[in-house]
Image: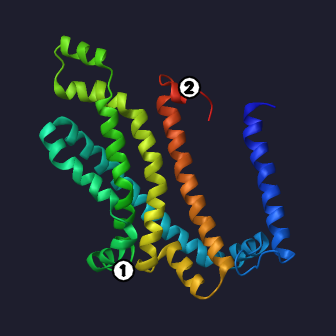
Amino acid sequence: MKPMVRKVVLPLIAFVAIVSIWEMVVRVKWISSFILPEPSAILNSLIEDREELWGALKTTTFSVGVSFVLSLALGISSAIILFTSETVLFAFYPYTIFFQTVPIIAIAPLLVIWFGYGIPAVVASGFIVSVFPVVASTLTGLLSADPNLKDLFKLYRASRWQSLVKLYLPSSLPFIMNGLRICGGLAVIGAIVGEFLGGVGVGSIIDVARAQQRIDKVFAAVLLASLLGLLLIKTIDLVSYLLLRNWHPSEAKDL
């Protein structure tokens, strides 16, 4: 079986098998539909509630997109600043680690107080949980440049700016792309958490449907959020492939 066919056919077979077993187990009452709704019920919710779900998904997509772009821009910029000054690195990097360890669910109410209900609080939530992987990955990449190339740049008396643009940033690209993959998934998680309290988007639908005991609708909303995260990560994979396929072994293969 060809590799590309195997990548498509085998997951499809596994998906059909899992969904079929899932449907059968719930229908024969081995598991209550209140706990785990049938796939057919989730599909019906996706169809019947499509206008509400689609509107919420557009709102969540916007919030995730803004969070991701902010994390990308500020994360890379912060890593460069930390890299260019050891004083700044030792002074502030420990606080970036501490910033990442704060549970977002614990400070989500504060975000609503600070930014109000709606998209601003959601964007802040998504940004807080997703920016650190970009900072950490970019900084690791900048510090991992080939020592021989660094000596070569010193030999030719390259300026700090020339070294940054032509050596350090290109060398850190694989690390940055890995950080963005993590950032993409966390941005979705952070946005959904923010929406629980912010009152908008897919997270709001999940919270309301839970209170209404519409478990099928909860699963439908969770499915859409998961697909959004998957789409974002696969887009990052494509960008990584296009940027690195001609020179880095991690992407010297087909997607």
* Left or right: 23 in relation to 168: right
Q: Mark 2 points at which residue?
A: 252
Q: Quadrant of residue 176?
A: top left
Q: Residue 54 sits in which quadrant?
A: bottom right
- Measured as percent of width and height from the top left, residue 242 is found at 51, 33
Secondary structure at numbered mark 1: loop
The crowd level at tag 1 (other Cα within 10 Å; few <14, some 14-19, many 20+) is some
- Looking at the rendered structure, the kind of residue marked 1 is Tyr
State the scheme by which the image is colored.
Answer: rainbow
At x 15%, y 47%, the residue is 91
Q: What element carries label 2?
A: loop
Left or right of 201? Residue 19 is right
Rendering coords of residue 41 (x, y %): 76, 76
Categorize mark 2 by other alpha carbons within 10 Å: few (<14), some (14-19), many (20+): few
- Residue sitting at 33 percent across and 63 percent down? 102
Mark 2 or 1, nearer chain start: 1
Where residue 44 appears, as percent x and y from the top left, is 75, 75
Q: Which residue shows up at 52% across the image and 52% down it?
A: 232
Can you say whether 132 is above or below 52 in the image? above
Quick one: quadrant of the C terminus?
A: top right
Q: Which label number is shown at residue 117?
A: 1
Disc 2 to disc 1, C-alpha distance:
46 Å
Front residue of this view, candidates 186 and 238: 186
Taking the image as shown, residue 226 lies to the left or right of residue 156, namely: right
Relative placement, left or right, of 68 versus 218 is left
Q: Residue at x 47, y 32 (%)?
A: 243
Q: Residue furthest left?
A: 87
From the viewer's perspective, is residue 201 above or below residue 67?
A: below
